[in-house]
Amino acid sequence: MNGETFREWMESILPQLKPNSVIVMDNASYHSVKFDKAPTSTTRKAEIIKWLEDKEEVIDKPMVIPELLQIVKRLKPQHEKFVIDELAKANNKIILRLPPYHYELNPIELAWSSVKNHVRMNNSSYKLADVKKLLVEGVNRVDAEMWGNFISHPIKEKNNFYEIDFIVDEVLAAEITDLRLTITGDTPSDSYSN
């Protein structure tokens, strides 16, 4: 798979989806082809300056590449557009990207894991035709109940992440309070009276 092939496939799929559909995507490189790739440290200085000027950034004094790249870093988030996102937007659809490295938030990853496990557990010949048959069987095994479980699992995981965030906040607040008391020499009762 590459960016061009994926874009062509998306062009054929988008008209079949309902308006305002939300398409959940992971961060595979072919999902993330950028319209206007930002310069990097390997980009020629003249190209960096042109990129900045195209973004209406005025370069009115001589600068070295690291200085120019600092400006690029500041501007990059405002100008980062993905080909697929813009294609979806033009077709009245929305792309929602999963955070990197969080397969547990993606129901499709859970379904695919189930399919691969079916192939792994039942593959005895290792012949391509047999693997293909097992793959089709594995896909057909994913029924409505399984799919419901694949969807509810990420919701539970998301809620767990929220709970962990609150716990981390509480622990950090307590640690900061203890550190402040240690630095100032206050006792907990002194800090409450202030």
Image: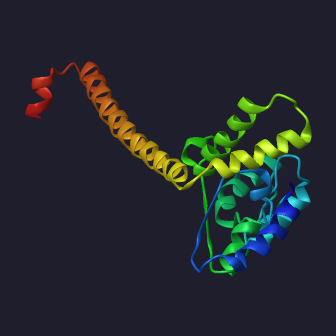
Q: Position of residue 11 (x, y in %)?
A: 79, 74
In the figure, 24 relative to 187: above or below? below
Of 28 and 11, which appears nearest the observer?
11
Instruction: Report the side of 45 relative to 38 (left or right).
Output: right
Q: Residue at x 88, y 52 (%)?
A: 43
Q: Give whichever of 168, 162 is nearer the camera.
A: 162
Whether residue 129 is visible to the viewer of this picture, yes or no, is: yes
**95 and 121: which one is in front?**
121
Q: Considering the image in quadrants, where does the N terminus appear?
A: bottom right
Q: Give percent across and percent down for residue 104.
A: 56, 42
Q: What x and y, as percent, mark residue 59?
A: 77, 65
Task: Answer left or right for 81 relative to 102.
Answer: right
Q: Image point 33% across, 40% down: which residue?
A: 166
Q: Is residue 23 above or below residue 16?
A: above
Residue at 28 percent across and 26 percent down: it is 180
**Camera sees residue 102:** no
Could you tell me which residue is drawn at 73 percent across and 64 percent down? 82
The C terminus, quarter of image: top left
The part of the image, by quadrant, that contains residue 165 is: top left
Q: Is residue 45 left or right of residue 163?
A: right
